[in-house]
Amino acid sequence: MANLKVAIVMGSKSDYPVVQKCEQKLQEFGVEYETRIISAHRTPKQAEKFAEEAEMNGFGAIIAAAGKAAHLAGVLAATTPLPVIGIPMKSSTLDGLDSLLSVVQMPKGVPVATVAIDGAENAAILAVQILATGNPELRQAIKDFKRRQEEEIVALDKEFNEGK
């Protein structure tokens, strides 16, 4: 099976500081990605074309980051058979609650997996888990990642309790 890559689509360049964390996490797992700026509202034809061609272009999952009226993930999900993960972006309006509700409240038949507001790292990890269903090496990398997380918390707990 060919190694699939992840598409990261952001609605605005201002989303990049958060999206960069997503890129870094994908790099940690050695997953190839492509990052684009495509707006659901200002470039709807490009959004639709990108989603229609994503599978053919070697993507296995799409991460969509958008704020305010955050329709990007839904627009992409409506047009592609690939799983779409939405990152609601914290904005100056309502601290991102508007974005969260726009991403998570999808109509029946158009699912979007949604992570926390500005949850770029979790979006990347979820994308890796999706790709890992068909890739034993990635699956092992996820298992190793979870084991390291556990070890870190156990060590922190031990250090904390020894310092009392």
Image (tube, grey):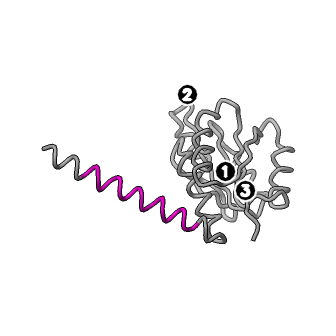
Mark 3 vs 1, N-terminal side? 3
Q: Nearer the viewer, mark 3 or mark 2?
A: 3
Find numbered disc 1 in the image and state the secondary structure of the residue it sits on.
Answer: strand
* Kind of residue at disc 3: Lys
* Kind of residue at disc 2: Ser
For this view, does 18 lie left or right of residue 55? left
| Front residue of 44 and 51 | 51
Find numbered disc 3 in the image and state the secondary structure of the residue it sits on.
Answer: strand
| Residue matched to label 1 | 63
45, above or below 131, in the image: above
Magenta segment: 139-157
| Residue matched to label 3 | 5
Label 3, label 2: how far apart the Cα atoms are:
32 Å
Q: Report the quarter where the N terminus lies.
A: bottom right
| Residue matched to label 2 | 92
Label 3, label 1: how far apart the Cα atoms are:
11 Å
* Kind of residue at disc 1: Ile
